[in-house]
Amino acid sequence: MKKPDSLEERMRLNRLYDLYGALLTEKQRQAYEMHEWEDWSLQEISEHLQVSRQGVHDLLSRAKEKLCSFENLLGMDKKFLLQETFLGELRTLLEVHEKNLPQGFLQALDLLLERGGVSHV
């Protein structure tokens, strides 16, 4: 299992928050955002939310557990990462074969990639 505070794990949890954060309780969202995005201490969050430090710790733990649970059920982050990998491989393939492909094909493909928020260049 990944170390809970590793940069990779924090980035993964932040992606999950972007996807599923709206499904958390209001207090879980507030505690998560203050702790992860605004770098508030547990004590600062405790005072702001008027709960104990242990309560803040529990809010954060439950929020992270819920985010992981939603991902296990829905798999949106996994799909997003697979799509990113696929698009990276497609860009590489296009760069390798760009000189051999018809210009009209490349222009049409560029339009499709731009519509999807991606550029192959």
Image (tube, helix red, strand yellow):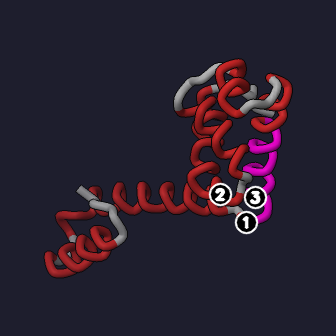
Q: Main secondary structure of the magenta part?
A: helix
Up the image or down, 69 lies above or below 51; here it is below
Q: Position of residue 12 (x, y in %)?
A: 62, 42
Q: Position of residue 33 (x, y in %)?
A: 59, 38
Residue matched to label 2: 20
Amino acid beneath label 2: Tyr
Q: Which residues are magenta?
A: 61-73
Amino acid beneath label 1: Leu
Q: Secondary structure at mark 2?
A: helix
Q: Position of residue 105 (x, y in %)?
A: 22, 79
Q: Which quadrant holds residue 99?
A: bottom left
Q: Is 44 displayed left or right of 1 in the figure?
A: left
Q: Which quadrant holds residue 95?
A: bottom left
- Decide which of 67, 104 is in the foreground and name it: 67
First in sequence, mark 2 or 1: give its number.
2
First in sequence, mark 2 or 3: give its number.
2
Mark 3 nearby-residue class (10 Å; few <14, some 14–19, many ≥20): some
Mark 2 nearby-residue class (10 Å; few <14, some 14–19, many ≥20): many
CA distance separating discs 2 and 1: 10 Å
Residue matched to label 1: 74
